[in-house]
Image (cartoon, grey):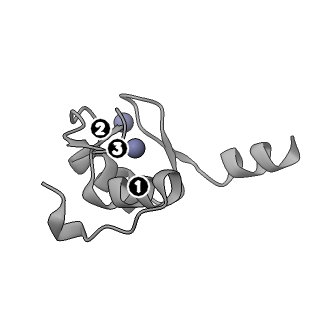
């Protein structure tokens, strides 16, 4: 897959803890601060999906369950 190779080449910043790759150092830093090693705490009310961020839970609910939720209503 050409596309995959291209993506990896364009993502030179790699997290040394989990191996996730990022295009920009700022994104890697954000990952280290807010994502890496942090236990997912937002749980989807419709299935067993768990996520670390409200925003991604909102995305998940919208895409998978076809429900639009307000970020503020997520506990
Ligand atoms: Zn990481
Ligand atoms: Zn779900």
Mark 3 or mark 2: name the one nearer the start of the chain: 2
| Neighbours of disc 1 within 10 Å: few (<14), some (14-19), many (20+) | some
Q: Quarter of the image containing the N terminus?
A: top right
Q: CA distance from mark 3 to mark 2?
A: 25 Å
On residue 26, the disc is none
Q: Is residue 33 left or right of residue 25?
A: left
Q: CA distance from mark 2 to mark 1?
A: 22 Å
Where residue 47 sits: x, y (%)? 37, 37
Can residue 25 be seen here? The reply is no
Where residue 30 sits: x, y (%)? 30, 55
Q: Is residue 22 left or right of residue 29?
A: right
Specify whether tag 3 is near ligand 2 (CB below 8 Å): yes
Q: Is residue 48 left or right of residue 70?
A: right
Question: Can you name the residue that lies furthest to the right here?
Answer: 2
- Asked which secondary structure carries label 2, the reply is loop
Name the residue tied to disc 2: 36
Specify whether tag 2 is near ligand 1 (CB below 8 Å): yes
Q: Quarter of the image containing the C terminus?
A: bottom left
Q: CA distance from mark 3 to mark 1?
A: 8 Å
Specify whether tag 1 is near ligand 2 (CB below 8 Å): yes
Residues under numbered marks 3 and 1 in contact, where contact means CB atoms less than 8 Å apart:
yes
Name the residue tied to disc 3: 46
- Asked which secondary structure carries label 1, the reply is helix
- Asked which secondary structure carries label 3, the reply is loop
On residue 61, the disc is 1
Where residue 64 sits: x, y (%)? 51, 51
Q: Quadrant of residue 55?
A: bottom left
């Amino acid at each position: 897959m050409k596309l995959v190779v291209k993506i990896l080449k364009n993502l030179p910043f790699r997290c040394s803890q989990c191996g996730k790759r990022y295009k920009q150092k700022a994104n890697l830093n954000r990952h280290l601060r807010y994502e890496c090693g942090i236990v997912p705490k937002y749980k989807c009310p419709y299935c067993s999906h768990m996520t670390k961020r409200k925003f991604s839970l909102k995305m998940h609910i919208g895409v998978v369950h076809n429900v639009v939720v307000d970020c503020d209503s997520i506990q």
